[in-house]
Image (cartoon, coloured by chain):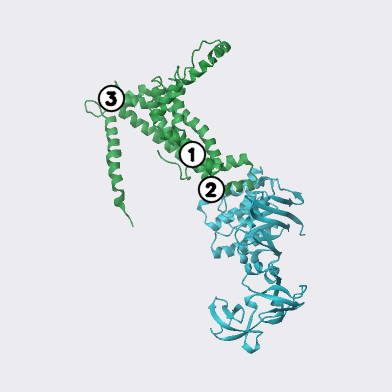
Chain colours: A green, B cyan
């Protein structure tokens, strides 16, 4: 029995809050203050190409770091017993239940020049030692307001989104398939590279998508941990709507281009995972 | 010709300190033999197979391969391949790459791989399927890929863990014949695990009947069927009438209230025994001509024969006959001496 009417609330919701805004973004991107149709916004955008570049660069680095940390954790976790799995899952999810801004502010106080790390190192006499060895004159390690801090913030916030899909996929791999590979002569390294890794790719692709997309469009992390030193796309867009440079037309155009780029990236990623049926569009 | 290949001596398997899965298994099998481990689920047959394959280590006891102890040899170093119950094919590879997997691991030259994959796929009637994806195959086809993937490596022993369990009856029958043919063609040892007694009787050279972690009987299908060693085997293999009796002396056993001539000897005088009579070995006659008299309780048509339940004074006999008596009719039952199988009680 078809119960199409059950989908009505969502269809209405989607029309009002997804389709209409998208159309508005498109109209704004192609518009100007005087209401005429123009492509000027896209022309203006070219002067911000550095922001695009650094956004994608930092998001890519953060995604790569998440993958390098997340994959081994997921793999290890999938081999463990149910008790450890449950505890580890809670540990991984726990930070996500805390407010995002709060977490990021916490990192600020850790990384600041007079923050926890530098204070502890200073009290331990680490900088005297360091300066003595390297002939420098440091009173603290500059950590806050660097691209590194932004990447750290991204990794910290988005790592669970890498671990969860990879873990889910590896955990579902039939142990018999692994036994079959061992039975056919594969040692544990060969089993990993020829069986487990290829079978886990759909999870990797989902994880990459789920980390990369929020990372490339983030603005709070770069603002708080990057101190405005590294302007990212999210900050640039925000500025066009709330900042001094009020220009929703340009903001819409940048958003549109970013969406298109992300869509292209996702299509490419999904092309890799074709036939696996697990990769997602985000 | 029949050289001993694998031997298990005093193999026991205990889980969680007290769950005994295998209890002192002693077993050997020969080169090029089709051996079946038969028993109900939980009897330890799959565990035995996994110990031979190297996926589990016995709690105690030794496993020998060609005279060499292999307890600590990991699966990937054993000259043994396995066909898994649910095939365990590599879904991220096509059929060709699945079958070629073992040879690629062993760094066989690509030209040899191609030739042998062709041969193997030909043997299981899957030529032309090389480029197909695993998911595009039916259960029976996946099963045959699993067999090809294993035999292509020319193992000394092929282990098969209920490989036909997921197939429908008709396909299963076809694959039974097919498997037997393949085994004879490649001339290697097959160790086959099943709970299906008919499958075991059809394919095996030797059957090992197991129950509750112990070997109940080892023998050819004919031995196992005609001369079951105990009530469990008799009951598990085919339909049986199992009745208690007393061995009066050599060649004479008393049950159902009278003495019968039999072919068994060597029992203690007056030893209490179990007697097996197969339903197809009971002959129906006029009451006056039978060794026993009983009343027909039910008649069920089974296709090739009628299954008749006959109530005699102290036993309910199951009889298979091609001519149906009337329900409620009094009939005579008799049995030839060589169809009476006498077993020690246990």
The label number, if any, that marks residue A89 in the structure image: 1
Indicate whether B277 appears above or below B175. Answer: below
Give the structural element (helix, strand or loop) at label 2: loop
In the figure, A171 relative to B48: above or below?
Answer: above
Q: Nearer the viewer, residue A153 or B234?
A: B234
Asked whether the residues under the numbered discs 2 and 3 touch, taking CB atoms below 8 Å apart as contact, a structural biologist would say no
The answer to whether B10 appears left or right of B100 in the picture is right
Between marks 1 and 2, how big is the CA–CA gap? 28 Å
- Closer-to-camera residue (B146/A137): A137
Q: Residues within 10 Å of mark 3 (few under 14, many from 20)?
A: some
Q: Position of residue B1 (x, y in %)?
A: 77, 59
Q: Is residue B188 visible?
A: no
Residue B248 placement: quadrant? bottom right
For the residues beneath circles 2 and 3, the answer to whether they share a chain is no
Q: In this view, does A53 lie above or below B15?
A: above
Q: Tell me what residue is drawn at x 70 percent, y 66 percent.
A: B220
Task: State left or right for residue A116 relative to residue B143.
Answer: left
Per the image, label 1 sits on a secondary structure element best described as helix
- Mark 2–mark 3 Cα distance, whole angstroms, equals 52 Å
| Secondary structure type for disc 3 | loop
| Residue wearing tag 2 | B91
Q: Name the residue under label 3.
A: A247
Q: How crowded is mark 2: few (under 14 residues within 10 Å), some or many (20 or more)?
A: some
Q: Look at the numbered discs 3 and 1 and tell me whether their residues touch, using CB distance below 8 Å.
A: no
Q: Which mark's residue is nearer the viewer, 1 or 2? A: 1
Residue sticking out furthest to the left:
A34
Residue pictured at 63% horizontal, 62% vertical: B39
């Amino acid at each position: 029995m078809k119960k199409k009417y059950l989908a009505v609330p969502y269809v209405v919701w989607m029309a009002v809050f997804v389709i209409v805004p998208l159309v508005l973004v498109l109209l704004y991107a192609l518009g100007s203050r005087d209401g005429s149709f123009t492509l000027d916004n896209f022309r203006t955008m070219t002067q911000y190409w550095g922001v695009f570049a650094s956004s994608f660069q930092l998001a890519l680095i953060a995604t790569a770091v998440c993958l390098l940390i997340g994959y081994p954790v997921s793999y290890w976790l999938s081999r463990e017993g149910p008790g450890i799995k449950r505890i580890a899952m809670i540990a991984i999810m726990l930070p996500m239940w805390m407010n995002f801004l709060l977490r990021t502010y916490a990192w600020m106080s850790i990384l600041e020049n007079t923050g926890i790390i530098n204070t502890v190192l200073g009290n331990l006499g680490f900088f005297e030692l360091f300066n003595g060895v390297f002939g420098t004159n440091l009173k603290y390690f500059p950590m806050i307001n660097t691209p590194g801090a932004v990447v750290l913030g991204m990794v910290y916030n988005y790592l669970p989104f890498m671990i969860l899909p990879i873990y889910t996929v590896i955990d579902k791999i039939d142990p018999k398939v692994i036994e079959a590979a061992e039975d056919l002569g594969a040692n544990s390294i060969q089993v990993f590279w020829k069986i487990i890794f290829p079978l886990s790719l759909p999870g990797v692709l989902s994880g990459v998508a789920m980390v990369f997309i929020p990372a490339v469009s983030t603005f709070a992390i770069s603002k708080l941990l990057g101190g405005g030193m590294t302007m990212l796309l999210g900050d640039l867009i925000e500025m066009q709507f709330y900042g001094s440079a009020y220009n929703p037309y340009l903001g819409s155009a940048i958003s549109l281009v970013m969406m298109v780029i992300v869509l292209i990236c996702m299509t490419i990623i999904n092309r890799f995972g074709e036939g696996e049926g697990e990769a997602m569009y985000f | 010709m029949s050289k001993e290949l694998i031997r298990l001596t005093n193999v026991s398997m205990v889980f969680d300190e007290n769950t005994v899965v295998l209890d002192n298994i002693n077993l050997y099998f020969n080169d090029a033999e089709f051996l079946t481990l038969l028993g109900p689920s939980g009897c330890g047959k799959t565990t035995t197979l996994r110990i031979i394959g190297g996926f589990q280590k016995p709690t105690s006891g030794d496993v020998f391969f060609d005279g060499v102890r292999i307890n600590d040899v990991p699966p990937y170093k054993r000259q043994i391949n396995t066909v898994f119950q649910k095939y365990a094919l590599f879904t991220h590879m096509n059929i060709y790459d699945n079958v070629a997997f073992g040879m690629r691991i062993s760094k066989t030259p690509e030209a040899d791989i191609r030739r042998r994959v062709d041969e193997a796929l030909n043997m299981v009637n899957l030529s032309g399927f090389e480029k197909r994806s695993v998911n595009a195959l039916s259960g029976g086809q996946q099963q045959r890929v699993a067999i090809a993937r294993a035999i292509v490596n020319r193992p000394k022993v092929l282990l098969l863990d209920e490989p036909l369990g997921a197939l429908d009856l008709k396909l299963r029958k076809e694959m039974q014949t097919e498997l037997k043919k393949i085994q004879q063609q490649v001339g290697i040892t097959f160790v086959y695990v099943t709970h299906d007694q008919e499958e075991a009787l059809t394919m095996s050279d030797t059957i090992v009947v197991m129950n509750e972690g112990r070997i109940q009987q080892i023998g050819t299908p004919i031995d196992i069927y005609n001369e079951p060693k105990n009530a469990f085997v008799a009951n598990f293999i085919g339909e049986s009438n199992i009745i208690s009796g007393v061995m009066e002396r050599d060649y004479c056993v008393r049950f159902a209230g009278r003495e019968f001539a039999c072919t068994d000897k060597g029992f203690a005088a007056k030893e209490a025994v179990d007697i097996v009579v197969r339903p197809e070995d009971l002959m129906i006659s006029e009451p006056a001509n039978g060794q026993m008299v009983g009343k027909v309780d039910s008649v069920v048509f089974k296709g090739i024969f009628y299954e008749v339940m006959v109530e005699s004074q102290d036993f309910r006999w199951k009889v298979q006959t091609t001519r149906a008596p009337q329900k409620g009719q009094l009939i005579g039952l008799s049995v030839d001496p060589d169809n009476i199988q006498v077993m020690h009680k246990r």
